[in-house]
Amino acid sequence: MNETLKTIHHRRSIRSYKPEQITDEELKTILDAGCMAPSAMNQQSWHFTVLQNPEKIQHLLDIAKKVLGRDDSFAPFYGAPTVVLVFGRRDAISPVSDGSLAIENMFLAADSIGIGSCWINFVVHFFETPEGKALQKEFGVDENYLSVGSFILGYPNETPQPKPRNEGCITIIR
């Protein structure tokens, strides 16, 4: 099996992280992989906002808890030291697909260099609220961008075993 396929088969969602921050070189490698993703008509409609400042990450969580009606146990970032918010240009042909493809590229790049990742979906709904839109502006992301999703990065405490794959999810018609 080649290295790409090994990475695809190895990658898991990580929900337990060591506290140390990933290096700038590791982050750049991961973000570069996102920028190499395919996109509709090569529009490259994505924008990535990286949060590594613990106070900014907590600020996002505090506002989200309030807006989404969550209690103090709400901890969707699992202690990861890096949060990546992914946005797509609203006027693009397919911003959600573009951003999702970029996220998958970044997941595979992260795994290939020993960095854990996990998709965090609550931001999609949060950034459509007035409070979320204000925070998006505070983070320097133009209102012409919609939230596609977010993910976390860090050094994994553990890598879970793969779960069984669903049977019957493939149909081949010849």
Image (spheres, rainbow, N blue to C red):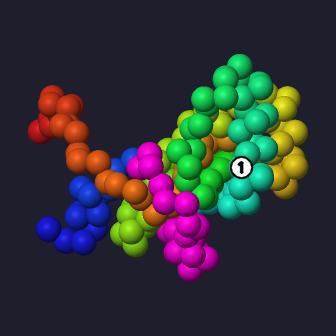
Q: Is 70 situated above or below 111?
A: above
Taking the spot 18% from the left edge, 37% from the top edge, the residue there is 164
Percent across and percent down for residue 103 are: 51, 54
* Residue 81 figure quarter: bottom right
Q: Which residues are magenta?
A: 14-37
Magenta stretch: residue 146 in it? Answer: no
The total of numbered circles placed on residues is 1
* Label 1, residues with CA under 10 Å away: few <14, some 14-19, many ≥20: some
Percent across and percent down for residue 25 are: 56, 80
Looking at the image, the residue that sits furthest to the bottom is 25
Percent across and percent down for residue 169 are: 21, 31
Is residue 120 visible to the viewer in this orientation of the structure?
Answer: yes
Looking at the image, the residue that sits furthest to the top is 69
**Type of the residue with mark 1:** Ile
Say left or right for 3 vs 17.
left
Is residue 93 visible to the viewer in this orientation of the structure?
Answer: no
Say left or right for 130 vs 107.
right
Say left or right for 153 vs 164.
right
Percent across and percent down for residue 123 are: 65, 37
Taking the spot 87% from the left edge, 47% from the top edge, the residue there is 137
Residue where numbered disc 1 is placed: 57
